Image (cartoon, rainbow, N blue to C red):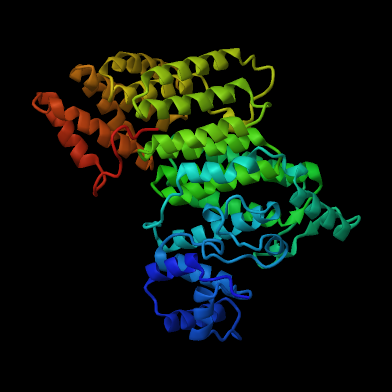
Amino acid sequence: MSRGPNTRLNDLFGLAGWSKGELARLVNRQAAAMGHPQLATDTSRVRRWMDMGETPRDPVPKVLAALFTERLGRVVTIEDLGFVRHGRSAKRREVGVQENPDGVPWAPERTAAVLTEFTGMDLMLNRRGLMGAGAALTAGSALSSAMHDWLHTDPASTTDSLRWAGRRDAARHDDTLHADPAGFDRYEAAPVGSEEIEALERSVEVFRAWDASRGGGLQRKAVVGQLNEVGGMLAYHHPDHLQRRLWGVAANLACLAGWMSHDVGLEPTAQKYFVIAAHAAREGGDRPRAGEALSRAARQMVHLGKPSEALDLMKLAKSGSGAQTLPRTRAMLHTIEAWAQAAMGRGQAMRRTLGEAEDLFVSDKSDVPPPSWMQMFDEADLHGMQALAYRTLADHDPSAAPLAQQHAKEALRLRAKGHERSRIFDYISMASACFIANDPEQADRYARLALVSMGETSSHRTWDRLREMYRLSGEYAGYGAIGELREEIERSLPKGAPRRVRGAQV
């Protein structure tokens, strides 16, 4: 029975610029290249997909996703095309995935499939050198509304999860390793044991350290590839203790892939990875990790000049993290909220939130080891975020600049080796605060320290921040040293128009 036009497919079809007949021919050609030479799609069938909401049989949705991904230069998933998946999740979700943005949240057993499909498409784009232009971010308010009830519910207590678990256990009986059939068309996945998972956990630490030191550009493809492999592993249902650890690896890799994507300007791709990370963390029973993943999406929103959207996401991240969230993690979440408040000129609220962050940070007795994903947030990061918040507020209230300088100096004093990107951000926060505080000599010093270090990273965000500092230096362009500094910045900046708005810093 017809469900009406597939608006998602129609919208993407309009962007692609094909005719229906051309799309039918491309589907047949692509399907043959993917090992399905028997497919015979015609114009009338394409019309039924678009005008009547008909969902084509496998492998057509995957073929269409690949075609639109290559055509549009950004990852397009089956859900993006408005199709309901065949199998268990399709039976339970008759309305399709159009209820919420990007089908968020998706059914519990769908996370591994979404993860594997998205990373596979991302790797394909990476190989072709496409940058994903033209995709749109989902509004933070839309994401938080769609995910609120889902994140606040224990997955083990939901009807869908219980029903799925019962069928799974009945199907495998005494089998401790059972492959979900949905995984067979991805690649030949294999079950793993504790030693393999330990190796994966170590690889996450290596990737995380590289990102902190060199930026996201050089290792992003490796992280996405590793995440794709983990998605295949999750097609098997391991013993619970191993499955939870695998979900943890998936959450950490997805969050890192998102952060690296954000670091090099692939913003819609980054947001999708943050959402995948939240899903994976929740599947593994780690609600604080899910909240931290959403806080990354909030930081991205502030960087893109959308602080009110960030506050919506932070409300969800803080409330959805659960009571087991450690004080230091809660302190980190507060600093992001404070930065968003500063970007909106809410100085009193920002100062109150930063005070709460300080209290939470010092109240953490370290009697419980922090999770691996929180080990990067130390006292230097606390001061770095405080410097950023005050420096951002100084755009609205210049009297905040001295406090930004104070925290930036402390952050620089405490920065450990291996955190070069954060050190650059501290230099730029300090230089920007000095310009606002009418101290161009000090600003020149710290700006040059940032420039010397920036060539060693692949972080686009550092250049975004440098552009903002360059704007602030304009008032002092007549000073000899500042004039030379501005010329040096102009020579150093990557070609192309600035991407960020005022206050866009992370």
Residue 134 visible somewhere in the drawing: yes
When the figure is inspected, residue 67 is found, relative to residue 194, above or below; the finding is: below
Q: Residue at x 47, y 37 (%)?
A: 298
Image position, residue 171 (x, y; %): 86, 60
Residue 79 vertical position relative to residue 271 in the rendered view, above or below: below
Q: Quadrant of the N terminus?
A: bottom right
What quarter of the picture does the C terminus occupy? top left
Give the left or right position of residue 167, taking residue 356 as reference. right
Q: Nearer the viewer, residue 471 or 196?
A: 471
Tally of numbered tags: 0
* Residue 143 to residue 357: above or below: below
Question: Which residue is most to the right?
Answer: 174
Residue 254 in the image, given as x and y percentages of width and height: 57, 46
Measuring from the top left, give residue 427's x and y in whole percent: 33, 25
Front residue of 41 and 349: 349
In the image, taking residue 426 as reference, residue 1 lies left or right, namely: right
Percent x, y for residue 499? 29, 44
Foreground residue, 417 or 272? Answer: 272
Describe residue 35's horizontal placement relative to residue 68 as left or right.
right
Residue toward you, 445 or 11: 11
Against 204, residue 225 (above or below) is: below
Left or right? Give the position of 235 relative to 358: right
Asked if residue 203 can be seen in this view, the reply is no
In percent of the image, x 14 and y 26: which residue is there? Answer: 475
Please give the name of the residue rendered at 51% of the width and 50% of the height, measured from the top-left corner: 272
Residue 11 appears in which quarter of the rendering?
bottom left
